[in-house]
Image (cartoon, grey):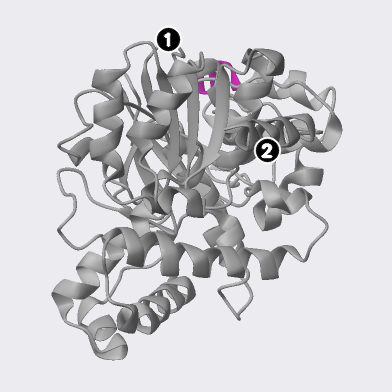
Amino acid sequence: MEAFFRTHRYLVEHLDGVIPRQLIKQIDWTQSLIGIKGTRGVGKTTFLLQYAKEFFDLEKKDCLYMNMNQFYFTVRTITSFAQEFVEMGGRTLLLDQVYKYPNWSKELRECHEKFPQLKIVFAGSTVMKLDEDEELSSIVSVYNLRGFSFREFLNIQLGERFKPYSLKEIIANHEKIAEDICSKVRPLDHFWAYLHHGYYPFYLEKRNFSENLLKTVNMMLEVDVLSIRQIEQTYLPKLRKLLYLLSHTSPGKPNISQLSVDCEISRATVTNYLEYLKSARLINMLYKEGEEYPKKPDLVYMHNTNLMFPLNSEPVEDQALRETFFYNQLHHSDSKLNKGPKVGMFIVTDNNRVKYKFKIEGQKGRGKHKSDLLYAVGNMDKGEKNVIPLWLFGFLY
């Protein structure tokens, strides 16, 4: 146990230059079983260590970070380890990559029932279906750690402290909000950099970003999707090919029959794989109102704009970037998006079930804007009335 505490101390003490994440303020830390889901590369490990650093005294040894890829857990159960930890005065156990341990959900429930004084915070992949887990669904509180928003990217790059705004606030007060932000920085000067490499925290590392992102995507497919969904390794090339083909038509209407032929898999398997790629946060699927999976989506988008560059050998179209950015940032704000009546249009339903129609444009049109639409315009610092700068939707979280 002392060896694990030494590792914990080292990791926490060497956690320098960590960027505060909005999620740490949103979690109810009084809950006894907390799940942090996030796609590979968004900083789940750093988030757990950040929580340990901010809320616990290293000298008390009442909090311990453990990565479940430790070979130690091939001969030791989580339950017996938790018991020993509690007997030594431990109160908070942070478990990373928990899905790498067999029967992890069953043992987490055992710990929850046997050790009421113990809090367990675990991190895992977005592919994990915790809401359907019969062991944990009724007792775990699940939170999603997302990639950087445009707001977080600006705060990191410029040392600012811009705050997030709700969709309702942006629609009602976008002129004043944009004025306040633009008095400190010109967001458009940094917008393309965010679209290219600002979503994943590892852009801050001194490594080639595109190569690192490709490595991360392959790990998502090989480890997260195949392992958690228990897909045979022989199907990996077909899954990779499907993602590649989708990246070249995104955003576009998927031709399930043609994809089935190209990837040499059944139509039903194509539909299943689309859902797997979505759960891994590699793509987003857009439906008409009233429709949802397992129906065929009307449009498939890449999950975020960063993915559009290394996966696509062709130049990325500006309109595709604009729509993908809008979908990504609105989706992360927990709004529901559906396909609008025309190309480049979205129907957005906020948390209060209020609906808005958005049209995504590159620049403010010369024609008269329709009063029943909201316009998210790319090449614009500040808007007016129902015309809102696109970059401002990057301040939703």
User: What numbered label is drawn on residue 79?
Assistant: none
Residue position marked by numbered label 1 in the rendering = 30
> Are there few (<14), some (14-19), or many (20+) residues within 10 Å of tag 2?
some
Q: Position of residue 89 (x, y in %)?
A: 51, 13
Residue kind at label 1, given as amino acid type: Thr
Residue kind at label 2, given as amino acid type: Thr
- Residue 187 is left or right of residue 340, and the answer is right
Task: In this rendered view, identify the residue nearer to me: 79 or 284.
Answer: 79
**Residue extent of the magenta highlight:** 167-174
- Residue 212 is left or right of residue 254, and the answer is right
Give the vertical position of 117 relative to 2 (above or below): above
**Quadrant into which the N terminus falls:** top right
> Could you tell me which residue is drawn at 18 percent across and 50 percent down?
292
Residue 372 appears in the picture as rendered: yes
Examine the image and state in which quarter residue 212 appears. bottom right
> Are there few (<14), some (14-19), or many (20+) residues within 10 Å of tag 1?
few
Q: Position of residue 67 (x, y in %)?
A: 53, 44
> Could you tell me which residue is drawn at 49 percent across and 55 percent down?
71
Residue 148 appears in the picture as rendered: no
> Could you tell me which residue is drawn at 81 percent across and 25 percent down?
160
Residue position marked by numbered label 2 in the rendering = 7
